Amino acid sequence: MSAPTTRVSQDILRLARKGRIVFTVSSYTVLAPFGYVLFALTYALWRGDELLQMRRMQALTAAAYRFMHRWLHLARITRFDVATKLEHLPEGACVVVANHPTLMDVTSIIGLLNGACTVAKPGLYQRRLLRGVLHGSGVIEGAGDNPMGSGRVMDEAVERLGQGFSMVIFPEGTRSPRDKLLPFGRAAFEMACRAKVPVVSVAITCEPVWLSKEQPLFDPPMQTPRLTLATLAIDDPARVDYDSRRLCQVVEGRYQQWFLGQGAQEPSTVAPKDTR
Amino acid sequence: MTDKTDTLEDDLKTMIVETLALEDVDPQSIETAAPLFGEGLGLDSIDALELALAIHTEFGVRTKENDENNRGYYHSVETLAAFIRQEQGKASVPGA
């Protein structure tokens, strides 16, 4: 094929992809209010035992996320297998940490876990339509700009872990830049040490990257982005005498190693290292 | 006055390094006006809690959890020292 023909077909492909994205965003805008109402109704009708309600709401949220990813897959906007198994997950509660290349990380990881608690930014948590549902699902309101607010967040997270819920935390605190991982915060590891539960490290890749800070929604790459999640390691905090600083260093070091070798080794082939 | 000012700032720098076990950091290398969090010294939210506890133990100054000025107080060694002086000043005024 000649160069101009290739360029034209690439332009058509890019236009088609943008069309699908516009369609998906429009669908979301139209359907989201119905979804919020459905969640609110479900929340109201399932009132009763608070913990049972949390589990049900989390399962419902996870199912909604899986549906969304199936839709994105069918529309060839992204490729993500919602049947992916995160291997070696512990039976009970755990703190799941992950790198954060795209906006799809939260939905994909919670979809695969079939529900978990997480920490939401105060701006999101305070939205009138979402607040009840997030609270009912066990989502914890983040500390925002207040450096002392993390004490409350920590207490609530440890309580959730004690109730048997898993927590999903992105220790970089925001989306990872394309070429590096940001320094890890200690909160996730402190939770695990206080609650005495394992830390499950999940490696996320998105190739080519999309919905990152550098690659926004309406600037999709030519190829369909493929999202993969895999267990990188499981760490028992007892091995570091429940020292969150050391635990953070161990996990962050492993992620850095994985990130550097990512070009040569896919995360699915990295053998999980159980340090228990 | 200058000596007294420097002493509190220096004490805070030493406290930060010791409390947070910053093995590779020399207290003297911490710039008084540099941010403690993020791009500065790189402390995180858990470090802030530990620091607040140490300040309470060492200086008798309690950091209120819901004070909207906390971010400003904990911005740098300089602002932290000003916060401690302010709270100690209040405590020394009868009826304050």
Image (cartoon, coloured by chain):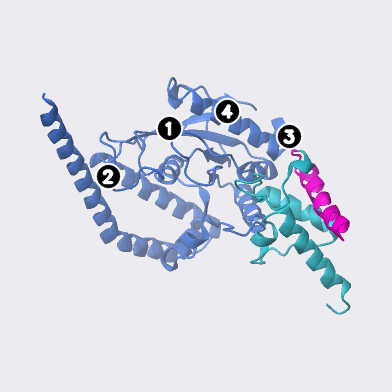
- Dot in front, 2 or 1: 2
Q: Residues within 10 Å of mark 2 (few under 14, many from 20)?
A: some
Q: Which residues are magenta?
A: B1-25
Q: Quadrant of the C terminus of chain A?
A: top right
- CA gap, disc 2 and disc 1: 19 Å
Disc ID at residue A71:
2
Disc ID at residue A254:
4
- Dot in front, 4 or 1: 4
**Residue under mark 4: which chain is it in?**
A
Earlier-in-chain disc, 2 versus 4: 2
- CA gap, disc 2 and disc 3: 49 Å
In the figure, the shade used to draw chain A is blue
- CA gap, disc 3 and disc 1: 40 Å
Earlier-in-chain disc, 2 versus 1: 2
Q: Which is more toward the observer, A250 or A37? A: A250
Labels 2 and 3 touching (C-beta < 8 A): no
Amino acid carrying mark 4 in the image = Arg
Q: Residues within 10 Å of mark 1 (few under 14, many from 20)?
A: few
Labels 4 and 3 touching (C-beta < 8 A): no
Labels 3 and 1 touching (C-beta < 8 A): no
Disc ID at residue A85:
1
